[in-house]
Amino acid sequence: MQGNIINITRYCTDDGPGIRTTVFLKGCPLRCIWCHNPESQEYQVEQYISGEIIGRSISAQEVLEEVVKDKVFYDVSGGGVTVSGGEPLFQPLFTAEILRLCKENGIHTAMETSGYADQQVFLKVLEYCDLVLFDIKETDNEKHRRFTGVSLEMIMKNLRQLEKAAIPFFLRLPVIPGLNDRKEHLLTVKKLVQELEHCQGAEIMTYHVLGAYKYERLGRKYLCSQIEEPSKAQVEEWRGLIGAK
């Protein structure tokens, strides 16, 4: 089982519990205007204008051989492997195989996803997930389509399917000043957290400009270049609105 990845990052602490290895897959059906990993959007291996290669083809078995090297750290810290992207559901068979192999080797598995995929595809990959980090970009369908290029409908249906599957999950919110920092949006997320039994809480993914340079290296224009990073006070206000601990 082959797939395309950007990289495999070890000793991560922000992609689920404990010390983790995060596998960043290539390819995403969304086009979030604030995306800080534009090199992850296209499935195929690319080049920066400097000639540097972005991405590589790898087998699920090779991924396992890399991530299993740190199993002792996962075991001690309660960590494991997280498949992220891009969008893992854009390569569903590859993602499922990575997660299956990890589970067979006693490694805790997590997936970070936008939830944008056919329902049967989503359910198949969930079979091998111990935890899901579910991104919520916007809760208004019109704004979601404007910001990401896709409808919210299928995403919300899959969120309900995730709840039915009884798999623990967190909601993750990229909040961008002046775009989706609306009080109504954040309060809607808070309501979702309260309604969904298996939701472990919501997290703010703070907007930053660290990925802006990548657009220039790709020969593309960054549409959020005029947006400033939020202050700590702003972030704390957002966290309060969603009820984050």
Image (spheres, rainbow, N blue to C red):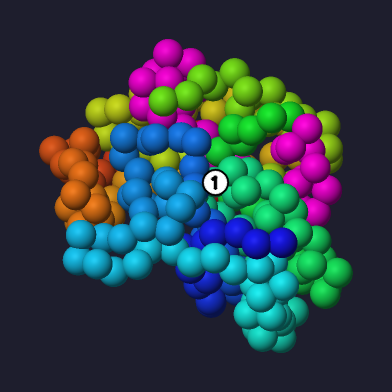
Q: For the point 69% across and 23% down, which residue is it?
A: 157
Residue 54 in percent (x, y) is at: 38, 63
Q: Residue at x 54, y 59 (%)?
A: 4
Looking at the picture, does residue 217 appear above or below residue 28? below
Q: Residue tagged by mark 1?
A: 87
Residue at position x 53%, y 77% in the image: 11
Residue 214, x across and y down, in percent: 25, 56
Which of the 4 image quadrants contains residue 228?
top left
Vertically, is 210 above or below 151?
below
**Residue placed most toward the observer, 195 or 109:** 109
Question: Left or right: 55 with respect to 133?
Answer: left
Question: Are there few (<14), some (14-19), or many (20+) residues within 10 Å of tag 1?
Answer: many
| Element carrying mark 1 | loop
Q: Is residue 161 left or right of residue 43?
A: right
Q: In this view, does 112 lie to the left or right of 177?
A: right
The total number of labels drawn is 1
Q: Where on the picture, by quarter, is residue 65?
A: bottom right
Magenta highlight on residue 138: yes
What is the three-letter code of the residue carrying label 1? Answer: Glu
Depth check, front residue: 245 or 148: 148
Q: Is residue 174 magenta?
A: no
Residue interval drawn in magenta? 120-148
49 lies above or below 74: above
Q: For the point 65% across and 83% down, which residue is it?
A: 70
Residue closest to the far left: 226
